[in-house]
Amino acid sequence: MDRAAIFSTVLARQAVRRTSGLPLLDVRAEYHRAVDQARWTAFVEQHHAVAVQRVLAEQTARDPGFGQKSWGGRMAVQLLAQRELQTAFRGWRG
């Protein structure tokens, strides 16, 4: 994650808003939000496949066809993986 690039992007957005007469951003808050988003994106890219496999393993132990029969089942796998990722992210310091 390139924090300098994130900061430059926030400053560029601020400049556009200033020249357009729009309300200015809270640069500090926007920077921290963007850093948090970049951290989340990196975490998901690194752990998504493992989370999906873990959910499938757990759910197919109960129902061998879980997540493979329908669009809704595949969506359920993604939602359960998303929940697992969100829980794990809270303790991640990457």
Image (cartoon, rainbow, N blue to C red):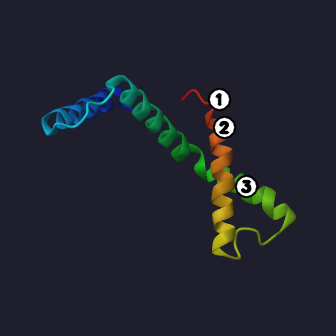
> In the picture provided, is 33 more to the left or to the right than 60?
left
Q: Quadrant of the N terminus?
A: top left
The amino acid type, in three-letter code, at marker 2 is: Ala
Q: Please give the residue where the numbered disc 2 appears in the rendered image.
A: 88
Tell me which numbered mark, 3 or 1, is placed earlier along the sequence: 3
Q: Nearer the viewer, residue 42 or 78?
A: 78
Tell me which numbered mark, 2 or 3, is placed earlier along the sequence: 3
Q: Please give the residue where the numbered disc 3 appears in the rendered image.
A: 55
Q: Does the residue at mark 2 contact the one at mark 1 (Cβ under 8 Å)?
A: yes
Q: Nearer the viewer, residue 19 or 47?
A: 19
Residue at 32% x, 32% y is 6
The amino acid type, in three-letter code, at marker 1 is: Gly
Disc 2 is placed on an element classified as helix
Residue at 79% x, 60% y is 59
Residue at 86% x, 63% y is 62
Distance in Å between CA atoms under marks 2 and 1: 6 Å
Q: Does the residue at mark 2 contact the one at mark 3 (Cβ under 8 Å)?
A: no
Q: Is residue 89 above or below residue 73?
A: above
Distance in Å between CA atoms under marks 3 and 1: 19 Å
